Amino acid sequence: MSGEEDVPAPEVAVAAPALGEPMDLNTALQLVLRKSLAHGGLVRGLHEGAKAIEKHAGLLCLLAEDCNQPDYIKLVKALCNEHNVSLINVPSAKTLGEWAGVS
């Protein structure tokens, strides 16, 4: 060994409300995405997302409202409807990318 140790990357802290306090949808989504990413259950992108939905492995799908590709939107909505997957629209793709851990 070269003397270097694997140091885990620091997690970005999400301001979580205290137990018993209500939280808004965006905060809850951030927490769910961070936990899913940490446990290897987060799938990102059209190709990976479509595969997960078709295998009935997907439970929730997030779609950016500012997506400018109508075919992409139609496909994601159709897959979610066909396989009974919940679909939530997020205001911007940039915000969604930050929440999902994309640099």
Image: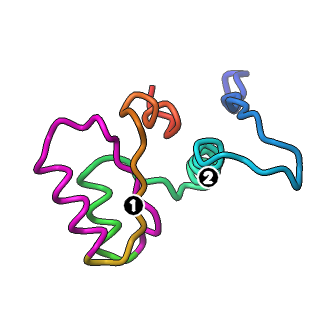
Point 66% across, 29% down: residue: 9
Query: Would you call the spot at circle 1 few (<14 residues within 10 Å), some (14-19), or many (20 or more)?
Result: some
As for residue 68 lying within the magenta part, the answer is yes
- Kindly identify which numbered label has been placed on residue 32: 2
Q: Earlier in the sequence, mark 2 or mark 1?
A: 2
Magenta range is: 57-81
Examine the image and state in which quarter residue 85 appears: bottom left
Which x, y percent locates residue 7?
71, 29
Examine the image and state in which quarter residue 2 appears: top right
63 up-or-down from 96: above or below: below
SS of the residue at dot 2?
Answer: helix
Point 56% across, 48% down: residue: 33
Kind of residue at disc 1:
Leu
Examine the image and state in which quarter residue 97 appears: top left
Which x, y percent locates residue 16?
78, 40
Q: State which quarter of the image contains the C terminus.
A: top left
Q: Is residue 2 left or right of residue 51?
A: right
Which x, y percent locates residue 15?
76, 33
Query: Would you call the spot at circle 2 few (<14 residues within 10 Å), some (14-19), or many (20 or more)?
Result: some
Q: Is residue 79 left or right of residue 5?
A: left
Q: Which residue position holds label 1?
A: 87
Which x, y percent locates residue 93?
36, 33
Decide which of 71, 12 is in the foreground and name it.
71
Decide which of 9, 91 is in the foreground and name it.
91
Kind of residue at disc 2:
Val
